[in-house]
Image: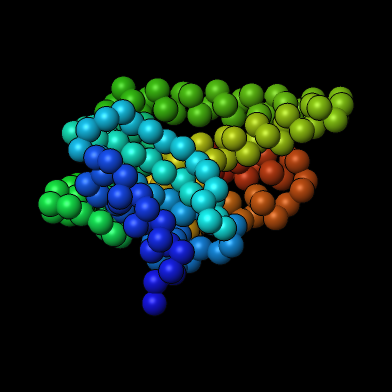
Amino acid sequence: MEDPELQEIVRDISQERDVIGVIIHGSSAHGKGDELSDVDVLVVAASGPTIHESHLKYSRPIDVYMAAMPKLSVKLHAVDPLNNNFVLNALVSGNIKFDVNGSVASLQAEARKLWAKGPQQMSLTEYGRAEATLHRMLASAEKWTLRSAASDESRILAGFRRTQVMVQAIYLYHRVRRLWTSGLPQTLQLMKDHHRGAYDLWTRYIETIEENEQLMLVRSMVNMVFKS
């Protein structure tokens, strides 16, 4: 049975002016949320500005993204550098709770066809730029790790830089292989299910506190990104 509070949230939003559709996405759409989870709502409007806001309603945080249908259609087909298209993800994974004229269902069907086709292949120029950028980030992480003993600030910055490179590498791993991505937890779950070698590097990274071992694992992930 659906959460009564969630039903009330949907009812309140659907009664707002110009709203023609409401989609619940994220963990709440599949009953996987807990008391700390946001209710993620994609609101389709007939017209008006794009609004993205978070607020507390009832007993839980609500994250609302509202845009007019034409703008959502444009965003659906926009190319994201890391294949993390928010509107695409919301439409593909979401549950329609309100749809005035069937246009939201049509948009969702369009999104699922796009998802099934997969992202565009990287051009040689994009591939080369991504590889060069990631290796520059790795060099920066190596430099910060060497100087991490200088101060607490250096140690924290070095750890932040290593993690930044690791996360960027995870997203590029998917981009190179024409795989869609989402938020980091969802992307990690996909990697766990389908790319265990890469996922094992991530789990070893978060389990170790030794800086040089972390750096070695970051190097391994970077090398894995562009390995055919």
> Which quadrant of the figure has residue 36?
bottom right
Place of residue 112 in the rendered image (x, y in percent of width and height, measured from the top left): 21, 53
Residue found at x 26% / y 44%: 19
Place of residue 105 in the rendered image (x, y in percent of width and height, measured from the top left): 17, 54
> Can you say whether 119 is above or below 136 in the image?
below
Image quarter of the C terminus: top left
Place of residue 185 in the rendered image (x, y in percent of width and height, measured from the top left): 51, 53
Residue found at x 33% / y 31%: 50
Q: Is residue 141 visible?
A: yes
Residue found at x 64% / y 24%: 140
On screen, residue 154 versus residue 1, left or right, reads right
Place of residue 60 in the rendered image (x, y in percent of width and height, measured from the top left): 55, 55
> Can you say whether 188 is above or below 131 in the image?
below
Depth check: 220 or 16 in front? 16
Depth check: 38 or 144 in front? 38
Residue found at x 38% / y 33%: 51
